């Protein structure tokens, strides 16, 4: 049995197997591959695409998904071991994970950070506790990384670029009125570096560097592939010759939990928005962004709606890669 | 590809095709007509029947439905084009509609008016934007009209009356403690006039006339059918000889957004409640009302529970007409 | 047609039939037994296991479940007959139950007490009104009893003990920071007494006795089986020689609705927590508790995680007994 919590411990070859199957599933949507199988979709945070694509994907493979929202329609859950449960939580993850494992063949979990203390959030405690007590595979539907999004992005890039080795991938920070989760940014680094890109991280200041765990993993993967990993704060340098511009906003980690101090820096970099002028510097580069995406804040309508925009393709691919992933874990 | 946003642009013959199929589906509930098909049910407002009947109906045809509630379990959505999305909305309808179109074969949307400004609400912006950006058929699950309810009502009336031509249909305003959506009232006018009834609109004062778009459409349809369209404020005149009394409450449009000024008029017309005394004036007429329905406010228990009450039949028919509609759009 | 509102009016032999089928369904999970059948799951309160197990269970039998949450995603419902509905409720149970009966083959309802007035709550009005107006079987998913939990518990006990006649069953009150529903406690008495156990009710003071209806039913069932029924406030006496310790917290009925007066008594009995020392007094007894369960408040980690703990098994059995129940009612 294997969990899918992060792509860090999955090899490029293993991930490619899933991507190859996803491409087949994009052609032929229905099968009985997972007939008699079921998945619990546990959402601690909202979702549109993830919910739709997992629920529908499982149905298209002949199986069944049940959506659970602890705290909304379900009981609030405790994640610490050994505690006296005299607070708000009515249920321990130990029971929740074990019982769901008895009912379902797979458990998928979305649990965003709490945004108070990065040293706590970076432990990814919620999904790790689910994985610890579950006796069936656990899938990450976004916590502090978003590995399903990684697969969807990589599938879209391979569809357009063919081989990705030594192509230039730029992960650019963009403005957003709120300090956001670093999950998709971390994931952008992980998947691009694993698949052979020369990777450039563009962000306003050194404080917007991502967690060392992901910076170092990206460096290591790039180096293993004979590719380069660079961080820059100069948009021109980053965009120049890029084949892919992947945009995402995130809050600077040194300000985690005291976001009012970060706000002036964020506000000063609204010009990091992806626009046609910057894209003109690229090598006819593709633009993408996970969804949801704030238009004319993170990217101009012009770029988002251009033929080189992959946002809809990447989102569609969520369906296909997740089906391939479920088959890989359960079939 | 065709949307089902309003019955206005569907001919009587086309709608009759759907009603005829619905009658067959009422006999034989299960088939594989939509095997491999799926529908996204997007609810911006609560629902009991609509949710049940669409979800179950799709299952009974061999397909699959996924329920999404933007703002509750999903992201809040922006509907204006070209705006700088620096407010509450995280996602643009352009992406939402396109991505759902990649996943699903059909998108159904419930989006009630915002009740602040009728000149805005009457544009039916939310569902029109979904229809604009969707590449699959969009179904109206109630916005400023409620076309699925229309089909269910007409099916019930045909079951009881056979032909409906030149029968007398009364749409009566009734009291409700809150100012309600005009959707079902608009729909009552549209469907009864399209199917040949002599239509009478009974309401407290001229200010309760419905939007000219629907008043004029009803007049036009009646005239095309050689039938009459009348507005009256006199219950006796309206009920006399009626074959159908269809009740609904709505807020007067001239007071839209400043409802405190409308309240005294509404409060003064609580006697518009449908009761046995008024029904005695009809030609052994049928009573109906979409659900939910406040008993002893809009209608007395006596009338609601009488053999001539069609409320349960109309509600059941939602299942059948929507299945027929989905088949018509997707099969 | 028969409802499943409480086990009180179901014979031991009938319930055993369901339990026997549940054991078969635990071996072979998939079938077409309920193909073409559907169930509405109406939740007035949160759920994890109940929702998962009914939805998945129906799917595994070839049928389809739809989840409805009145007040959240659906309309608030009125339960009194003959009232003028000018308050918050938009819909009467009369319509809700009749319409759901037209759509679905079965209606399951979860409706906890309102916790204001036990003389009202004990009437179990919500589910009784659903049963009254429904034309299909109604299943209790927990109101003031929890009969599905009873079946799951009894299945787990039979798996471990074989015959349960004249074995010692202890229902022990335990501390919880909030005054809880007596449903599972009532159900613990009903099912253990019906299946031949010698039953001991352990609680802090006479005020924690359960409603006379359930106390008397338990006495009657015990007496019919030639078994004993005892209430005690002495943990030592209760645990001594026990084969089963079933834990649950509940608020004392005489303090219903004025819980601040009960709090000091509850707080003074935190030592009723199930621990290894007490379990050592039993005859190698099994421990169980419905879920959710607050660890180190109601039971120590040590007991909850011991080989004699049946909590996960009981929870798993929810799936199997409910499938057997649905087959029994609908096949």
Image (tube, coloured by chain):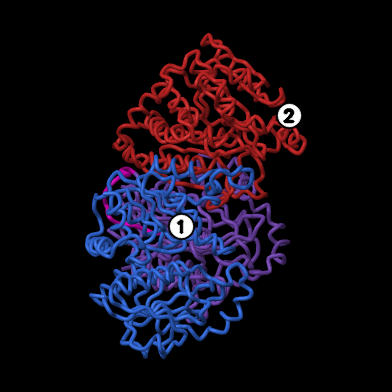
Chain colours: A purple, B red, C blue
Bounds of the magenta span?
A: A27-40
Q: In the rendered structure, the residue with mark 2 lies on which chain?
A: B
Q: Residue furthest top?
A: B226
Would you say residue B161 sits in the magenta stretch?
Answer: no
Residue A280 lies, in percent from the top left, at 58, 45
Within-10-Å neighbours for mark 2: few <14, some 14–19, many 20+: some
Q: Tell me what residue is drawn at x 54 percent, y 11 percent.
A: B227
Would you say residue A35 sits in the magenta stretch?
Answer: yes
Q: Is residue A103 left or right of residue B270?
A: left
Label 2 to label 1, Cα distance in Å? Answer: 43 Å
Q: Quadrant of the C terminus of chain B?
A: top left
* Element type at mark 1: strand
Q: Is residue A257 left or right of residue B164?
A: right
Tag 1 residue: C110
A146 in relation to C245, above or below: above
Q: Tell me what residue is drawn at x 38 percent, y 39 percent.
A: B57
Q: Residue furthest right?
A: B261
Q: Is residue B307 visible?
A: yes
Marks 2,1: beta carbons within 8 A: no
Residue B225 lies, in percent from the top left, at 51, 11
Q: Main secondary structure of the magenta part?
A: loop
* Element type at mark 2: helix
């Amino acid at each position: 049995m294997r969990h899918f919590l992060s792509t860090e411990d999955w090899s490029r070859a293993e991930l490619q197997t899933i991507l190859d199957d996803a491409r087949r599933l994009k052609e032929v949507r229905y099968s009985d591959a997972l007939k008699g199988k079921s998945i619990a979709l546990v959402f601690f945070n909202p979702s549109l695409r993830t919910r739709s694509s997992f629920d529908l994907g499982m149905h298209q493979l002949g199986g069944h998904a049940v959506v659970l929202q602890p705290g909304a329609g379900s009981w609030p859950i405790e994640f610490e071991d050994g505690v006296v449960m005299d607070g708000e939580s009515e249920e321990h993850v130990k029971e929740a994970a074990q019982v769901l494992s008895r009912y379902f063949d797979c458990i998928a979990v979305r649990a965003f950070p709490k945004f108070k203390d990065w040293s706590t959030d970076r432990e990814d405690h919620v999904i790790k506790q689910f994985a610890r007590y579950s006796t069936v595979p656990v899938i990450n539907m976004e916590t502090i990384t978003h590995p399903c999004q990684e697969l969807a992005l990589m599938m879209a890039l391979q569809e357009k670029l063919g081989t990705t080795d030594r192509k230039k991938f730029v992960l650019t920070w963009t403005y957003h009125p709120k300090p956001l989760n670093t999950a998709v940014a971390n994931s952008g680094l992980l998947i691009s570096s694993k698949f052979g890109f020369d990777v450039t991280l563009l962000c306003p200041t050194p404080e917007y560097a991502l967690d060392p765990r992901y910076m170092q993993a990206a460096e290591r993967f790039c180096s293993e592939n004979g590719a380069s990993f660079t961080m820059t704060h100069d948009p021109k340098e980053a965009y120049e010759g890029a084949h892919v511009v992947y945009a995402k906003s995130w809050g600077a980690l040194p300000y985690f939990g005291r976001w009012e101090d970060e706000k002036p820096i964020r506000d000063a970099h609204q010009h990091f928005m992806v626009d046609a002028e910057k894209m003109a510097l690229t090598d006819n580069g593709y633009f993408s962004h996970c969804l949801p995406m704030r238009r004319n804040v993170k990217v101009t309508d012009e770029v988002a709606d251009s033929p080189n925009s992959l946002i809809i393709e990447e989102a569609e691919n969520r369906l296909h890669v997740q089906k391939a992933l479920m088959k890989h874990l359960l079939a």
